[in-house]
Image (cartoon, rainbow, N blue to C red):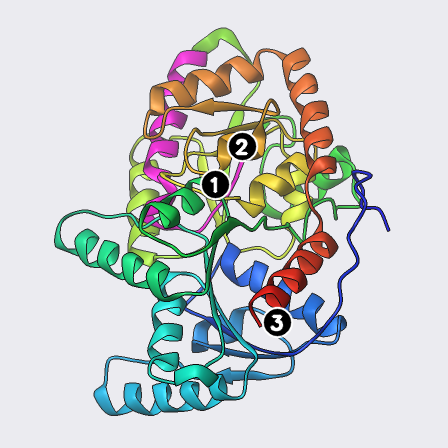
Amino acid sequence: MADRAGHTRAATGGTGRVLMIIGRATGGIGAHAASLVRGLTEEGWQVVVATAPETARRFDLGSHVEVVWPGRRPLAAWLALRRLRALASGADVVHAQGHQAGVVALAVTAGAGRGAAPVIISWHNAVLGSGALRRVRALLESLEVRRADLVTGASQDLVDRALSLGARRAELAEVAAPAAGRSCLDKAAARALLADELGIDPDSDWLLTVSRIAPQKNLEILVDAARLAQARRGGASTRGVVWIVVGDGRDDLLASLRATVGTDGTPVRFIGARSDVPTWMAAADVFVLPSAWEARALVVQEALAAGLPVVASAVGGLPELLADAGVLMAVGDPRELAEAVVGLLADPERRSALAAAGKRRWAALPDETDVIEEWTVRYGSVI
């Protein structure tokens, strides 16, 4: 069988029981885990998911989900760990999604002896922060890599980090974007639909960001860039511009961002979480992601599939993901972001070239079936 890029897929075989542990997730980790559970189940694997309540509510994680997660109360935490230990004892492999889940997986398999299920920890994010908290997190990273049977990274910098900390085995595990390429509307139809619903001028330039409202996403940089871009364009163009942010997250941060926008009329609209992201991708002119760090961002893959020119921070796995299909900017630099966006809006030929390059790049990326088959091979290698 060949994928959409023409690659030949290797035959895989063998199934077993997987305990997949997922921490508190509201974005890409949860979407990837849901895709993995669905695909593994279709391949015959018995997958039990253990996760936090908010993650279980947000994602379809299959029919075997246990809402069990260690909280802060000692008794509740002890009971949760005991239940997780019982689930792990019946698994052929324990697969932890993210740093939180990795620590939990090691806690519930510690001391189980020779019969313990092998532990795989998948890193999707770099450990950010500073001071004492950063040192504690770095210590936990070291614990994870030294005790896990396999550490995977969603981008090469995460793999390199694991190896530098002493991982016995670490490798790249690419992540597919389930929603990529799913819009069935053309730009005019998508824009007319959304503009009518939300009162956005359909004749404006639309700059789209799809993101959790979280410190890592650097949305204050986006607001500053929007202000700078508005001042730079000035009277040079009669065409309006609107920066649209799709996503939810921290209410306090969102309130602060909205207050900043409200003081000077900066053209940024925060519209909350949406289930129709492919329609927004179809309607937009440019996709913008100013994050402090990203691995293999699903939304960037979706933008590539939609033929959207991408402006993103040159951090984490974004340079390797975009290749020549986007514009990379220094992290945390609103002036550079504004200049990149203004330049693209003034250059339709370059936007068209980037759109075509994006579609070619997306066609070369692994799809969900490729990712499932790669995980089947990995599971077989550790069981």
Q: How far apart are marks 2 and 3 (CA)?
A: 30 Å
At label 2, the amino acid type is Glu
Question: In the visual, does 322 lie left or right of 228?
Answer: right
- Is mark 2 in CB contact (under 8 Å) with mark 3? no
Q: Can residue 116 be seen in this view?
A: yes
Residue density around tag 1, few if under 14, some if 14–19, many if 20 or more, within 10 Å: many
Is disc 1 placed on a helix, strand or loop? Answer: helix
Is disc 2 placed on a helix, strand or loop? Answer: helix
Mark 1 — residue? Answer: 156
At label 1, the amino acid type is Gln
Q: Where is residue 268 in the image (x, y as percent from the top left)?
A: 44, 36
Q: Which of marks 3 and 1 is nearer the N terminus?
A: 3
Mark 2 — residue? Answer: 320
Q: Distance between the residues labelled 3 and 1?
A: 28 Å
In the rendered structure, which segment of residues is drawn in magenta? Answer: 208-233
Is disc 3 placed on a helix, strand or loop? Answer: loop
Q: Residue at x 56, y 35 (%)?
A: 321
- Is mark 2 in CB contact (under 8 Å) with mark 1? yes
Q: In which quarter of the image is the C terminus?
A: bottom right
Q: Earlier in the sequence, mark 2 or mark 3?
A: 3
Residue 60's disc number: 3
- Front residue of this view, candidates 290 and 364: 364
Q: How far apart are marks 2 and 1 (CA)?
A: 9 Å
Residue density around tag 2, few if under 14, some if 14–19, many if 20 or more, within 10 Å: some
Q: Which of marks 2 and 1 is nearer the N terminus?
A: 1
Q: Is residue 247 visible?
A: no
